[in-house]
Amino acid sequence: MGAYLNPGKEAFEEAVNSEIFIDKTEMLGYLNTIVKTKQKYVSVSRPRRFGKTMAADMICAYYDRDADSRELFEKRKLAGMSDWDEYLGKFDVIRLVMTEFFKLGRTVEDALTAIKNRVLLELEERYPETKYDSSDFSYSLDRFYRKSGIPFVIVIDEWDAVFRIWKDNSEAQRLYLDFLRDWLKDKPYVALAYMTGILPIKKYGQHSALNMFTEYSMMAPRQLAPYTGFTEEEVKELSIKYDMDFSDISNWYDGYLVSDRIPPEKREEYREGKYNGHKFPIYSPLSVVESMTTGVIKDYWNKTETYEALAEYIRKDYDGLKDAVALLMDGGRLAIDTSTYQNDMTTFTGRDDVLSLLIHLGYLGYDDERGEVFIPNREILDEFKTSTKGREWVSTFKAFETSLELLEATWNGDEEKVAELVEDAHNQAGNKTYNDEAALSYGIQLAYYAARKYYTTILELDTGKGYADVVYLPAPQYAEKPALLIELKYGHSAELAMDQIRRQKYLDRLDHYKGNTLVIGINYDRELPAGHPEYKHHSCKIEKW
């Protein structure tokens, strides 16, 4: 047994012998289907506390040809699968934990040299008759493989350590990615390459340096979805065993919604909206274990993270990030674009990049079908509350409360209150752009920001005979809410806005919401001089259609 080559089964045995062990060995059944195929490159990203290292220990114990693990696995769920032992003990396993090598004060060149030297040293001890070239790592591994006839299962834990320790050192990151690519890509000596970390594989521009890997992330865990955390059935069984209230456990630690592959025989039903069996609610493993063993349900997140880790990112006010946080903390969901996120901790071009990172860190859940983020449970909500206690958040939460007040006033048909609150929001546009139509539209969207919890926003809805300025359509989970159609006018009257809606038949496009639509006409007279008592005064008319 080596430190890096064929590390054995002891680490996984410790997990099996622990007070609480959740059997995830069926994951090996899936990995066996991709061993020695083009899909043999696996990159798994999950938050801390979600069992990444235990899975890596399990993989080592199973494939390690020196581990003698049959008795260990024949008692597990894996043994119920056909051909479960096809690759049991059939490979040389190389196991690396990258945080061991990439330490502050050490150059990336020194770290990579240490990796090569230590792996080659143990291979030389295992196969002393094999000649190799110590200056060429990939060639040397190929030599060992061809002489032994045994390919490698390569397990890399904390693969993203470089990107977390050297966040701003792009050159070090490039050298590291080049090393992994040259070592692993298209190599016949690789039977399976399994990398695990918090972050997905780093992008440069629109491309990945390790494009041979399939990503199994919190956004799209694919076939590994059931093994991402604890499933509902597993937590129910623990709740019974430990006499804990399952509903309380669920409220505190559930909420991560992940999607498995849709079986071919179910895809027609899925397209018809009749199948969602590929979706799994996932629980935070460490928190569940802590609550079960102590009997106390509380926030255990800070056992591995301090609140500053979250606060550092959400205080970056990209594109209204703070407003988005306020909405999420109120129980809302927010549609985001994850495509521009570069899979690191420093490259942010806007609000959605920061929110994408928070998905991978476990601070946000993600609905992949709707493209929406949300705060998954009470434990994480507590982390947000702790991270937003500073004075810098007072104005954000005050503005959000005002937005909620506006929404309630709209639903209640309180025209004077709506006009007052819209006027306040419009004032935030500033005098230079105050009379600009875009500024008023922006003011309306700002004022109704809280509506995103309940609605989908559509700007300039084409009605066939004109464009409705702002439309809010209720989300499916809030179908009882009225649709909102807002028409803006300058220098006329709110009544004229209503007349235009009738004349242009805007509501024909909202026929589905007939009988449950609020039409809001808002007017602002931009011709009045600054000294006039009605300067910047808004009027409002609300009708239910």
Image (cartoon, helix red, strand yellow):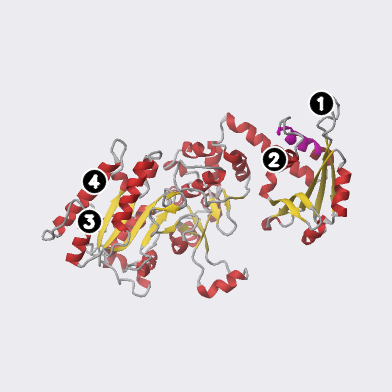
Task: Identify the residue under disc 4.
Answer: 113
Mark number, residue 446: 2
Tell whether 159 sits left or right of 490.
left
Does residue 149 belong to the magenta stretch? no
Tell whether 84 sits left or right of 313.
left
Q: Where residue 507 sits in the image (x, y, percent)? A: 81, 57
Inspect the image, locate mark 3, and give the three-letter code of the amino acid beneath it: Leu
Residues packed near mark 1 inside 10 Å, few (<14), some (14 to 19) or many (20 plus): few
Q: Earlier in the sequence, mark 4 or mark 2?
A: 4
Determine whether label 3 and label 1 are within 8 Å by CB: no
Q: Secondary structure at mark 3?
A: loop
* Mark closer to the observer (2, 1): 1
How far apart are the two marked residues, 3 and 2, measured between alpha carbons? 58 Å
How far apart are the two marked residues, 3 and 1, measured between alpha carbons? 79 Å
How far apart are the two marked residues, 2 and 1, measured between alpha carbons? 24 Å
Seen at 58% across and 30% down, the residue is 392
How far apart are the two marked residues, 1 and 4, measured between alpha carbons? 72 Å
Residues packed near mark 4 inside 10 Å, few (<14), some (14 to 19) or many (20 plus): some
Inspect the image, locate mark 1, and give the three-letter code of the amino acid beneath it: Ala
Task: Identify the residue under disc 1.
Answer: 530
In magenta, the rendered stretch is: 419-429
Task: Identify the residue under disc 3.
Answer: 5
Tell whether 222 sits left or right of 147.
right
* Mark closer to the observer (4, 2): 4
